[in-house]
Each structure stands twice: as C-alpha cells, then as structure tokens.
Image: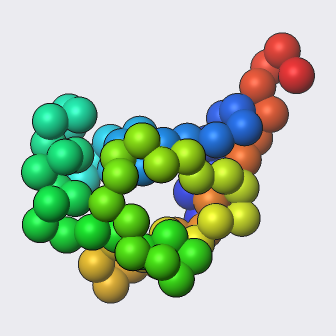
C-alpha cells in the first residue's frame, strides 16, 4: 500500500498517526514498546526515526511504501 506525505521526510510517530493506529505521541511510544515496526528490513522502535520516499515500512502484516510529495513552496 502506498502512503503519501508532504516534505522531505515523515517520522515514525507521524506515520502511525497518519494511519490512525495511534492518536498521540504518548501512544506512539507505548505502541512501539509492544510492537516494533520494520523499516527496510530492520526493526525500528524510535518514534522520531525519519522516513523518506521509497522506504518500506511493515506494521504487523501490512507493508507500506512511502511516496513523498514536494511542499507547495518547493
């Protein structure tokens, strides 16, 4: 599944909120303690990890491919 975001990157926490998996930063931390995600084949538990276009993120059984979109000012 493709996920589009604006700008150069999106953090793990922002992605989880965008996907409606969590609703706050505190929930992100708790979620990642119980269920680390996989970014490009590597386990990741940092909510501030910057993700860029082309990254593949697996959350549970679902895999997402990130697609960046330039900001309106770019």
Using the rendered view, name the quadrant where residue 72 is placed: top right
State whether residue 9 appears in this view: yes
Say above or below: 74 vs 30: above
**56 with respect to 23 (left or right):** right
Using the rendered view, name the quadrant where residue 35 is placed: bottom left
Q: x%, y% of residue 62?
A: 39, 78
In which quadrant of the rendered image does the C terminus lie? top right
Q: x%, y% of residue 7?
A: 70, 33
Q: Residue at x 20, y 33 (%)?
A: 24
State whether residue 18 appears in this view: no
Using the rendered view, name the quadrant where residue 10 is placed: top right
**48 with respect to 17 (left or right):** right
For the image, the number of numbered tags is 0
**66 with respect to 18 (left or right):** right
Q: x%, y% of residue 20?
A: 28, 48
In which quadrant of the rendered image does the N terminus lie? bottom right
Q: Nearer the viewer, residue 50 or 69?
A: 50
């Amino acid at each position: 599944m493709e996920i589009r975001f604006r700008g150069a990157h999106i953090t793990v926490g922002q992605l989880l909120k965008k996907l409606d998996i969590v609703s706050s930063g505190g929930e992100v931390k708790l979620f990642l303690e119980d269920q680390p995600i996989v970014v490009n084949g590597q386990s990741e538990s940092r909510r501030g990890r910057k993700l860029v276009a082309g990254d593949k993120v697996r959350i549970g059984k679902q895999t997402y491919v990130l697609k960046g979109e330039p900001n309106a000012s770019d």
